Amino acid sequence: MASKDRVFIATIGDEDTITGVLLAGTGHINDKGKKNFLIVDSKTTSSTIESAFEEYTSREDIAILLINQHIAEQIRPLVDGHTAAFPAVLEIPSKTHAFDPSKDSVLKRVRKIFGD
């Protein structure tokens, strides 16, 4: 599948974040019943988050994966290990957790390139 076929944004986030992106129109359920979003709450296990991350980063129809930074922290080695151009993994803040640029995997790579 070519990069032009990557037409979806996947999201792993808390309920408020998922509600927002679904209201923005990014939600999709394919013909196999697979969703492009995962709602994470206090009962969601790290293994469930890891499985969703691995699924979304291996799907050829996803261009961008948004993940709340506080959730990315739960699977940090997996997030930091993702180096493919597609899907782009972007860490975003949530309503209840501030964004910390020092933890962002993309910004870490940029700082490494520039020797900071």
Image: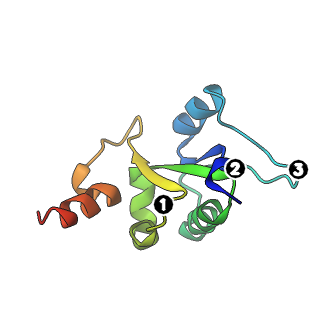
Question: Which residue is at 79% across, 45% downward?
Answer: 29
Q: Which mark is residue 114?
A: none
Identify the residue under disc 2.
Answer: 5
Between marks 1 and 3 in the image, the one whose residue lies nearer the viewer: 1
Residue 32 in the image: x percent, y percent? 87, 55
**Labelled pair 1, 2 in contact (Cβ < 8 Å):** no
Identify the residue under disc 3.
Answer: 31
Question: Which residue is at 21% across, 65% downward?
Answer: 113
Q: Alpha-carbon distance for marks 1 and 3? A: 26 Å
Closest to the observer: 98 or 110? 110
From the viewer's perspective, tell me whether residue 59 is left or right of residue 86.
right
Q: Which mark is residue 85?
A: 1
What's the image's color scheme? rainbow
Q: Alpha-carbon distance for marks 1 and 2? A: 14 Å
- From this viewpoint, which residue is outermost toward the left? 116
Closest to the observer: 72 or 24? 24
The count of marks equals 3
- The three-letter amino acid code for the residue at tag 1 is Ala
